[in-house]
Image: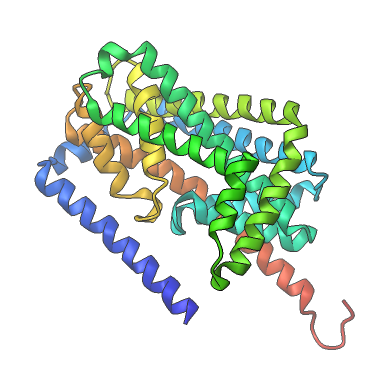
């Protein structure tokens, strides 16, 4: 039954992606020939540069997570950590938003280390750190690019919403008084297991309150990631012949990234393209070019997801062979 639900949910997300793309092409009057022309005529050296910058982002994210694991005294073999992280990259595309990839790397590393609570805490803190980086970079970019962005009320509202959500999440997890109030609300017998899990997670996260140095370094890495990521999109835009003020990318990209966290489409496909068309229209970019920019960026993500999936699947297969040796062969 659980497998059926997951399959239906995945099919639903595919359907939502398709509907969003159909609506985009129909109502935004996307010129498919122009879109394909932009992609075919892209500057390949610049695309390679964008691909390389994206790799740097993944490496920094990997190191950011490893830093938290080291602080929690979780030190698996580097190869094992790479496999778990690679699986996360792959499943980020096919499971609910980036949350799906986080679940996979949490489960995979937990089985290896036998420390599920600690591993889950590091993954959650890693995600919160990244989200905080998004909010900070978007907010500061808005200050510097106020004149360019001010007429776009949708951007201002989006930044206000993601900032408010971050504050609420941080208070719920790290403020003892607010956490106790939330915990008191979970009185239903059905909430027993969830309540216990939430309590354990809260305890693990509070461990880091005494490791402020690690948290500061982690946040600095997140800020660096959120500065480099828009640059990768900017380079991709240049490759497609889109030459606009770089400040738009520092304001728009974090907001779009936060919106595509919503687990309603496969890899954010469809949702992200609509956001690119809506936001970059304010910067004077036509819809066909904006969608081309989004699709090329998604293609780069898919390539890395395929690489991560290959690493993960081959390693899982190898582990299964080790766990189930042929009859007569000692393990």
Residue 260 appears left or right of 310:
left
Give how far across and how far down residue 307 sits, in percent: 55, 50
Colour mapping = rainbow
Q: Residue at x 62, y 49 (%)?
A: 180
Q: Quadrant of residue 9?
A: bottom left
Residue 152 appears left or right of 266:
left
Residue nearest the observer in this picture, 205 or 308? 205
Q: Residue at x 50, y 28 (%)?
A: 226
Give how far across and how far down residue 146 sits, in percent: 31, 14
Q: Is residue 270 above or below residue 294?
A: below
Q: Say whether residue 52 is visible.
A: no
Give how far across and how far down residue 295 sits, in percent: 32, 42
Give how far across and how far down residue 217 sits, in percent: 68, 26
Q: How many labels sit on residues?
A: 0
Residue nearest the observer in this picture, 43 or 153? 153
Q: Quadrant of the C terminus?
A: bottom right
Q: Residue at x 22, y 40 (%)?
A: 36
Q: Residue furthest right?
A: 330
Residue 223 appears left or right of 135:
right
Q: Residue at x 56, y 24 (%)?
A: 224
Q: Is residue 260 above or below residue 7?
A: above
Q: Is residue 120 above or below residue 255?
A: below
Q: Say whether residue 135 is visible.
A: yes
Q: Quadrant of residue 327?
A: bottom right
């Amino acid at each position: 039954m659980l497998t059926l639900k997951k399959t239906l949910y995945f099919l639903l997300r595919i359907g939502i992606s398709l509907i969003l793309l159909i609506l985009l092409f129909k109502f935004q009057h996307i010129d498919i020939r122009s879109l394909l022309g932009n992609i075919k005529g892209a500057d390949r050296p610049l695309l390679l540069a964008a691909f390389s910058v994206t790799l740097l982002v993944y490496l920094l994210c990997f190191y950011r997570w490893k830093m938290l694991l080291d602080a929690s005294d979780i030190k698996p073999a580097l190869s094992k950590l790479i496999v778990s992280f690679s699986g996360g990259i792959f499943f980020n595309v096919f499971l609910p938003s980036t949350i799906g990839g986080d679940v996979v790397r949490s489960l995979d590393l937990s089985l290896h280390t036998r420390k599920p609570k600690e591993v889950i805490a590091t993954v959650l803190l890693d995600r919160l750190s990244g989200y905080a980086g998004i909010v900070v970079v978007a907010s500061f970019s808005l200050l510097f690019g106020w004149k360019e962005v001010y007429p776009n009320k949708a951007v201002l509202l989006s930044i206000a919403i993601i900032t408010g959500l971050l504050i609420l999440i941080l208070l719920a997890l790290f403020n003892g008084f607010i956490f106790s109030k939330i915990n008191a609300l979970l009185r239903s017998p059905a909430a027993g297991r969830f309540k216990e899990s939430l309590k354990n997670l809260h305890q693990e996260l509070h461990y880091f309150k005494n490791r402020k140095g690690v948290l500061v370094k982690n946040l600095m890495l997140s800020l660096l990631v959120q500065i480099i990521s828009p640059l990768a999109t900017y380079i991709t835009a240049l490759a497609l012949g889109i030459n606009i003020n770089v400040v738009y990318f520092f304001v728009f990209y974090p907001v779009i990234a936060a919106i595509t966290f919503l687990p309603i489409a496969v890899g954010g496909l469809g949702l992200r393209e609509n956001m690119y068309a809506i936001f970059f229209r304010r910067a004077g970019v036509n819809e066909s070019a904006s969608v081309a920019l989004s699709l090329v960026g998604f293609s780069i993500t898919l390539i890395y997801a395929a690489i991560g999936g290959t690493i993960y699947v081959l390693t899982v297969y190898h582990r299964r062979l080790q766990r189930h040796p042929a009859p007569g062969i000692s393990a």
